[in-house]
Amino acid sequence: MGSMPNSSVAIILVNWNGIAFTRACLQSLQLIDYADYSIFVVDNGSENSEGIQLKKEFPLIHLIETGKNLGFAGGNNVGIRKALEMGFSHILLLNNDTEVEADFLGKMMLHFSENPKLGVLEPLICFLHEKDKIWSAGGKWQKLLGRALTVGDRQYLQNFTANREPLDWATGCAMLLKRAAIEQAGLMNEQYFVYFEDVEWSLRIREKGFEIGLVPEARVYHEAGASSKKKHDEGTLSPQVFYYHARNQFFLLRSISSNPMVSLVQYAYHLSRFALWMVYFLLRGRFKKLKAVVKGIRDGLKVKLKPAPTWP
C-alpha cells in the first residue's frame, strides 16, 4: 500500500447468493498485474454465510457483511464508504459475475493519468461465454426520449470501432472512479436499489464537470444478469426486475431537469413502451409481471425522490 495517495484502487464486489460467480471473479483478480489494489467483498445478506466462506478461501479480501440485501446501490455504497475512509484514491465497482484480463486495471489507471478531466472510466465489457461479442462499450444518453443507450451492444469486436469521444454514462458492472468525483457528486442513490442507479450517478458526476471515458484496450467479461436470471413461474426474469425497471426509469426522468416539452416527449415515450410490455404480459397470461409494471409506473411517478448520500 506504499503509494496510497495517488494510485491506490479499492475493488468492490457485491455478493448476494452468488458465491460461484464471486469465487471465479476473485480468482481472475488474483492474476492482475497492477500492484496497488485491495479487494472488498460486500456480502449483501447472502444465505449460507457465503461471505465467511469466501474470506476463508481468499484471506486477503476485506469482508464487509451488511446482514441484509441493500440492493446494488446500497451494497456498493457500503464498500465505497469504507474504501474512502481508508484513503483509497480510486474505486472500482465490479460485478461479481465478471472475469478480467490481467492488464485491465493498469491500462485504465494509465488512462486516468493522461487526462485530469476524467472522473469515471469503463473498460470494454464483453460476454463471458462469447468473448468476441460486446456487452457494453459505455453508455449514451438520448435526451429527447430520456433513454439510456448502450454503445456497442451485442456487436462483434471485429465490427466495432471505439469512438474516443466522452461517454454520457458508465455501467456499474465495471466502472473505475476517481475519489474526487465521488466527493463532489456524492454516492449512488440507494433509493434505486437496482437498475439505472449507474446512469443517474454518471449524469450527476458529469454535472460536476467530470468526463466519463471508455478504455477499449482494457477488457472485462460479463456473465450478464446472473443475479436476476433465476427460474420463475413466469419465465426467466422475476416480476421484480420489471417493477424496478419501470419505477427507476421514471425516477431517472424526474431527477433530471428537462424543459416541459422534452419532459412530455420522454414520459409519453416510456409510458407507451411500458404499455406494450403490459399488453404482451396480458396476452401471455403473465399477470404477476403485468402487476409489477403497473406498480412500477405508479411508484415511479408518485414516490417522493430521495437525494443520494453525500461524502463524508
Image (cartoon, rainbow, N blue to C red):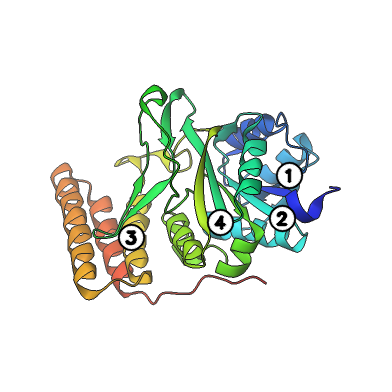
Residue tagged 3: 249
Q: Residue furthest right?
A: 2
- Answer with mark 1 or mark 4, whichever residue precedes in sequence: 1
Q: Is residue 197 left or right of residue 276?
A: right
Q: In the rendering, at what x and y percent does residue 202 appear?
A: 47, 58
Q: In the rendering, at what x and y percent does residue 53 appear?
A: 72, 39
Residue tagged 4: 69
Q: In the rendering, at what x and y percent does residue 154 appear?
A: 35, 32
Work out whether residue 139 or residue 188 is closer to the camera in this orientation and state it.
139
Name the residue at 41% across, 39% down: 163
Name the residue at 75% across, 41% down: 55
Q: Do the CB atoms of the residues marked 1 and 4 lie less than 8 Å apart?
A: no
- In the image, residue 254 above or below residue 18: below
Name the front one of labels 4 and 2. 2
- In the image, residue 132 above or below residue 93: above
Residue tagged 2: 89
Secondary structure at numbered mark 3:
helix
Q: Is residue 220 left or right of residue 301?
A: right
